[in-house]
Amino acid sequence: MESSPNSLPKDNSVVVSKKSRLLRTLKYMLIGTLCNSAIWGLSIFYLKTTAPSYTSEMILNVGATGPGVNINLPNIGQAITSSSSAFGRSSDPRENYKLIAMSPAVLAAAAASLDISEQEFGEPTITIVNNTTMLMVELDGSNPANSQAKVKALYEALYKRIESLREAELLQRNQAIQKAVENAQVKLTQAQKNISLYKAKSGLNSSNQITDLINNIESLRKQRAEIIAQQQQVALQLQQLSAHLKLSPQEAADALALQTDRQFQKYLTEYADATTTLISLQKNRGPNYPDVVVARQKQEAALTALLERGQILLNRPVEQLTLERLSLDNSNGSGIKRSELFQKVVTLNARSQGIAAQVIVLTQQIAQLEARLADLTPKESILESLERDLQIAEAVFASTLAKIDLGKGDPFGSFPLLQIIEEPSLPDNPTSPKTKLVLAGSLLGSILVSTGLILIWWREPVNKAMKNIVREILA
């Protein structure tokens, strides 16, 4: 039986195809083996050669509030105490602290405290915890104690740096305020000097002096009005009594002066006796009768002595008629009553004169005080202006001094208080290398490589078959 001429080539083609497929499969298997070996080899090499790293954590809290205090100065201001939030500003103080902690100066200081290089110390990882006032600080180390020591050193360096910044800020503020204090003190001294010189020059010590002067003038006016009313009352009484007695106050005083003189009263008695004797003798005898002549001579001698004594007492010439008007006869007791009335007239007259003198003195005093008031009133506005300048200078000086004290009492204005919430931790397990993560990554890499090679291996025969089909269709 003869074979078909096309049978041998067909068998050879099948054999060649199987051999080619086998070679291609072996090729991809070799590539896959090499790739997986490389992945796992590198992973194992990384795990074996990489030194373990431990991470220590620390949580810091940034003070959220600070005291806001205003000074209270009597007659100048008021005291207000409030709390201001450090997070109510346009910037977050945690960001400032984060930048400071990661600054080269702080890192260098922290590394120097551990006697290691900055490269060995490393760079911290600082995380701002949202919706809190806290910061989380992380640092890697070769062992748990080393990482913990690094975090502690970083905190100490950060704290010292913040303290130095606070001191520098306080120093700058104090220098500026000290200069302001010196300027305020110069102005205060000048204001005190100005007001002292003006008081000495003007004679006006305070505005109360004007008020007291006005009160004194009003008091004197009231007193003068009362005394004038009293004077009018006394004058009316004196006028009525003088009209009743039909003599003036001077005449009443003269009568009292004559009455109280014993010599005058003796001469008056002798004159009265002589007159009585003469009258009784003239009834029965003529004018030239010796007894009548003797009695007349005695009467004339007594009258002459009486007029001379009256002139001496009253310091002016007097007449017989005047003496008769001023005479107080006590023979029937009426003289005593008239004497009392005369005494009242004299008393009222003296009282009226005394009151009139008081009115004159009060009027003079009022005029002097009014002149003083007219002189001091224009000066009051100048004094008030100088006092106002002095009060302003005192207020500025006192408030400036208060700012220094308040600034010293609140050193956390620009740099809020920093507190450790959680001490640097001592890690139990290394943070790198992570064996499970590396192995999982290697496994995933192997799966991806293997899957890719299988897809490539499967894609080549499919492509060839599709090309053959296309050729047959075109043929």
Image (spheres, rainbow, N blue to C red):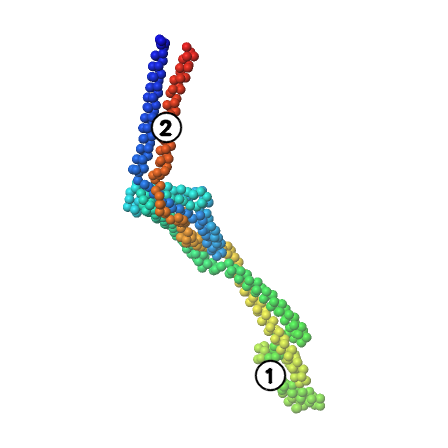
Q: Can residue 338 be seen here?
A: yes
Residue 102: give x, y in percent of width and height.
36, 42
The residue to which callout 2 is attached is 450
Q: Residue furthest front?
A: 1
State whether residue 336 is above or below residue 228: below
State whether residue 261 is above or below residue 165: below
The local secondary structure at tag 2 comes to: helix
Question: Seen in the image, is 38 located left or right of residue 61?
Answer: left
Q: Earlier in the sequence, mark 2 or mark 1?
A: 1
Q: Say which of 125 and 413 sits in front.
A: 125
Q: Can residue 101 be seen here?
A: no
Please give the count of numbered marks on the rendered protein: 2
Query: Measuring 46% from the left and 58% from the top, which residue is drawn there?
Result: 199
Q: What residue type is labelled 2?
A: Ser
Query: Measuring 68% from the left and 75% from the top, which residue is drawn there?
Result: 244
The residue to which callout 1 is attached is 264
The local secondary structure at tag 1 comes to: helix
Separation of marks 2 and 1 at Cα, in angstroms: 170 Å
Q: How crowded is mark 2: few (under 14 residues within 10 Å), some or many (20 or more)?
A: some
Query: Measuring 47% from the left and 53% from the top, which residue is drawn there?
Result: 81
Q: Which residue lies furthest to the right in this view?
A: 284
Residue 359: give x, y in percent of width and height.
58, 67
